Image (tube, rainbow, N blue to C red):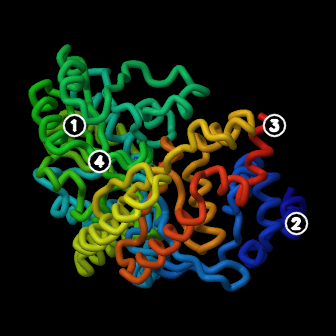
Amino acid sequence: MIDDVHNSLSKLTTLEEAVALSREANKENHRRYINPELVSMMGLIGFDKRFVKAEGTILWDEDGNEYLDFLGGYGALNLGHNHPDIEAAVSSVSGLPNLLQASLNPLAGALARNLAFLTPGDLQYSFFGNSGAEAVEGALKLARAATGRAGILSCIGSFHGKTLGALSVTGRDKYRHPFEPLLPGVSFVPYGDISALESALAAGDIAAFIVEPIQGEGGIIVAPEGYLTEARKLCTAAGTALIIDEIQTGFGRTGKFFACEHEGVTPDIMCISKSFGGGVMPLSAYIASAEIWKRAYGSMEKAMLHTSTFGGNTRAAAAGLTALQIICRDNLPGQAAEKGKYLLEKLLLLKESYPLIRDIRGRGLMIGLEIAHPEEGMLNKLTGGAIGRMAEEYAGAMVAGELLNRHRIVTAYTLNNPSVIRLEPPLNISCEQIDRLLKALEDILSRNKGLGGMALSGAKTALKSLFKQ
Ligand SMILES: Cc1ncc(COP(=O)(O)O)c(C=O)c1O
C-alpha cells in the first residue's frame, strides 16, 4: 500500500508545475476533470485567457498584456487583488494554530466584536463560514429555529447562492428546476412590491423574509426608496425575521459600509461574505441580534446545533480583521460613493447617444449597464431568430467579450439577467482607469449599431453552437 502511494507521487502534478501550466494545458485539465461545457462557454467569448499576475485593479496574462479589472470578483475584490496588507496579515499568523476546534479562537472573537461594532443597530452574534451560500444557510436555519415557523419568503430575481437551502430562496427558475423539489415552505414576491410583501406575511407563518438591498445577479436592481424601511416595519409586525443579504453589497461597495444603511434599516440577521476575506481568504458570516440568536441557540445543549469545520479559522479571521481596518483607514465606502457618482454620470451621458444601452443603474461602484436586444431586425430573420435568441442569453457576454478582447478590460454579465453587464471594480480604482473604461465602451458602441454586428465579428462560434442546440 505504502509503495502504491509512493508510486503515485511521481505521477502527481506539483504546485510548481501547476503554476507554470500553459493556457492549453490548463484548459485541457478543466475540460477533462472539471467542466468541459464551461470551458466551451468561456472559450466563445475569449474568457479562457491565462492570467499569471494580479495586483490591485490590474491583471497580466501570460504574454505580459495588462488588463483592467472591472469585475472585481463579483464584489469579492473591494480591496483589489492581493492587497499587500492582507497578504502580510495572513502570513503573520502562520505560526498560530489555524484549525483547533478544542479551543476558542481569539481572532474569531475579535473579528465578531469588530463586526458588532461596524454593523448597524443591535446586531451582535456572529457565525463564521466560508462562502456566501453558507452564511445564507445559517441565517435561514437561525430564523426557523428562533421563530418555530417553516415559511420563508424571498424575492423574484433574487440570488442567494446555489447550495440546496440558498438555492431554495434564489428566484431564478433556470438554476432551480433541475434540483426540485427544493426546500418546502418557500414562496416569492416581486422585488420592491410592498403590498405583495404585506399580503405574503399576513398569515403569520413566515419565519424569515430574505432580501438584497440591491439585487446583484438579478441585474443590479436598486430597491425602490423606502422599500427596506417598510419591509422592516412589516416584518416586525408579523414576527418575521428580516434577513438582509449584504454578501455583494457590503463592505463599502454601494457608498456606505453596508447598503441597508442608506435607509437606516437594521435587519434581524445580516449575511456577509465576498470582500470580508480581503479578496484573499474565503470568509463569510451571518450576524444576528441577541434577541433572535438567543431564541434559537440560547442554551448549552443548543451550542453545537450549527457548526462549520473551517468557519472562523485563524488565517481567514486575520484576513477579515485586516480587511475591516483597510476599509475604514482608506474610507472605501467614501471612495465608492465619489467614483461611483462620476462613473454613473458619464454612463448616463453615453446612454443618451447610443440606443444599444437600454439602461444604466446602480449605487456607488455597483453599476449595471443593460444592453438593448436587436429585436426583429433583418439579421435576426436571416439567421432564423438565432441572433435574437443569442442576444437574450449572451447580450452582456458579447459586450463583455469585446471589452476583454479589444480593450483588455474584464467585466461580466449578471447571472440572473444576462443582458446586464456589471461594473464592480475594486473601490480604490482611479478616475483615469474609469475614463479608460468609458472610452472603451464608447468605441464599442460607436462601432456596433446593434448586437448583430458584434455577434458576427466577435462571436461566430457562439452562433454555430446555437444552431446546434
Ligand atoms: C447577494 C448574494 N448572496 C449570496 C451569494 C452566494 O455567495 P457564494 O457564491 O459565495 O456562495 C452571492 C454570490 O454572488 C450573492 O451575490
Q: Which residue is mark 2?
A: 11
Q: Which residue is mark 1?
A: 242
Nearest to the observer: residue 353 or residue 255: 353
Q: Amino acid at mark 3?
A: Lys
Q: Amino acid at mark 2?
A: Lys
Whether residues under marks 3 and 4 lie with C-beta atoms below 8 angstroms apart, the answer is: no
**Residue 23, image x and y in percent?**
77, 70
Marks 2 and 3, Cα distance to the nearest angstrom? 38 Å
Whether residues under marks 2 and 1 lie with C-beta atoms below 8 angstroms apart, the answer is: no
Circle 3 sits in a helix, a strand or a loop, which is it?
Answer: helix
Q: Which residue is mark 3?
A: 468
Q: Amino acid at mark 1?
A: Leu
Marks 3 and 4, Cα distance to the nearest angstrom? 37 Å
**From where the camera sits, is residue 309 visible?**
no
Q: Earlier in the sequence, mark 3 or mark 4?
A: 4
Q: Which residue is mark 4?
A: 222
Circle nearer the viewer, 2 or 3: 3
Relative to 159, residue 127 above or below? below
Horizontal placement of 83 versus 339: left or right?
Answer: right
Label 4 neighbour load within 10 Å: few <14, some 14-19, many 20+: many
Q: Earlier in the sequence, mark 2 or mark 1?
A: 2
Circle nearer the viewer, 4 or 1: 4
